[in-house]
Amino acid sequence: MRYLSTRGGVEPVDFADAVMMGLGTDGGLLVPERIPSLSADTLKAWSQLSFQELAVEVLSPFVGDSIPHADLVDLVERSYATFLHPEVTPLAEHGGRQWLELFHGPTAAFKDVALQLLGNLFEYLIAREGGVLRILGATSGDTGSAAIYGVRGKAGIDIFILHPKGRVSPIQERQMTTVLDANVHNIAVLGTFDDAQRIVKTLFNDLPFKQRYRLGAVNSINLARILAQTIYYFYAWGRISGGDPEHRISFSVPTGNFGDVFAGWLAKRMGLPIDRLIIATNRNDILSRFVASGVYQAGEVFQTLSPAMDIQLASNFERYLYYLLDEDPAAVRALLAELEQTGQLQVDGERQRRVAEDFDARAVSDAETLAEIRRVYEISGYILCPHTAVGARAAADQAEAEVVVLATAHPAKFDAAVVEAIGIEPAPPRALQGLLERETRCAELPADADAVSAFMRETLDAVEA
Ligand SMILES: *Cc1c(COP(=O)(O)O)cnc(C)c1O
């Protein structure tokens, strides 16, 4: 399988190069040159597999001959051995609904499903092809810890994660700073998340620095993250349907960057019998507005109780746009130019109808999020994290369909919202226990790109010496 850019400016690359490239060198996102199509017999056979066996089958056509089969099996085994549940992403039934629990990984949120695999892929490809990788990112909470856990202790990789000092939750801060592996470098910036993000952008734009130190990113645009996230859609369908191709199910997906729900769309395009895909957003509703109107227009970013979805421009949206525009890079470039110049883009009526066939969407307020946590707790005793509650509230509108809600984080990770809703502190899972007592390591720097680059140079020059 080869990969192309949504903007048409990248020579086709294989899976290994696509993973290492991350963002396309032309600024576009990488997409497979064709989407594999699965037969009913294949889907039936897959419905009997374990999560790990299924992962190998789902990934194989995308990996192609880039990685030998035995090595892929080993990568998958190691990536999901860090999950605390034997099924990796089990289904749980509470209050008359199926929840797809994606939070049994080392940081108790769904990003582990993709980042545990990505970290191992990076290490494997670096060992095979030589070189080093230095990951630089800014986090307002969830992604930083999942990225750190993905690459901790991995040979050939260093990771620098900036967070705004005192402005991430104490659990999230400890999840990052208690990782003491020599290749993990936490930096608490004396400023806001926007300051941290601006510093990262400045350093990526400093091309001599970027090239000298081989800087890369692990944001949600890496193709391998999307592919890893398709696995659990297949898994959930197999467990529920037993492989019956007539049995269609729907998914409600709490989303901000359009990553998770795009993975579901891809699974459906591959032939998985999905009925409805529900885009569940919080008050940051650019995606719901797009589904309703065909207009994609960024607004102001609001802080909500589901902070991992406080995003306006969704970085994976461009992948969907590429398919919506019939895989025409010139059309993608034209619409993105429109967005850049006018602050919005609009698709035509025919395409708007296709969007409405692909997705339902619902924006959920903080008040509704709290009410949903309360409602589900009262009828079943099951405690939702606020992101999952957004998905649950959006699913409640679909009376007809059998809807599985993606449970994207453990409620103990977002305990303030849970306490506000039901007055109960959720018991932490094993991954979050004892964090406050552990030793930490973290550099503290002013919100200044020069200070951060000096710290990185010093650290990396010492590694190289
Ligand atoms: C990142 C995150 C989301 C949103 O995921 P997308 O990639 O934006 O679809 C939802 N819930 C939690 C807990 C997250 O960490």
Image (cartoon, helix red, strand yellow):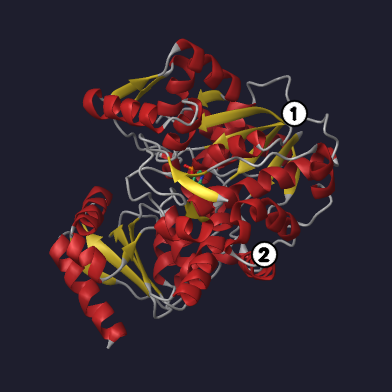
Question: Vertical placement of 241 versus 464: above or below?
Answer: above
Residue wearing tag 1: 402
> Looking at the image, is mark 2 or mark 1 earlier in the sequence?
2
As drawn, the residue found furthest toward the front would be 11
Question: Vertical placement of 85 versus 366: above or below?
Answer: below
As drawn, the residue found furthest toward the bottom would be 465
| Residue drawn at x 68%, y 51% as measured from the top left | 58
Q: Amino acid at mark 1?
A: Glu
- Provide residue 404's location: percent of width, then percent of height: 69, 36
Q: Mark 2 vs ligand 1: CB under 8 Å? A: no
The C terminus lies in which quarter of the figure?
Answer: bottom left
Q: Is residue 410 left or right of residue 49?
A: left
Q: Amino acid at mark 2?
A: Leu
| Residue drawn at x 66%, y 21% as measured from the top left | 398
Question: Vertical placement of 197 versus 133: above or below?
Answer: above
Element under label 1?
loop
Closer to the camera in the image, 17 or 232:
17
- Whether residues under marks 2 and 1 lie with C-beta atoms below 8 angstroms apart, the answer is no
Residue wearing tag 2: 84
State whether residue 30 appears in this view.
no
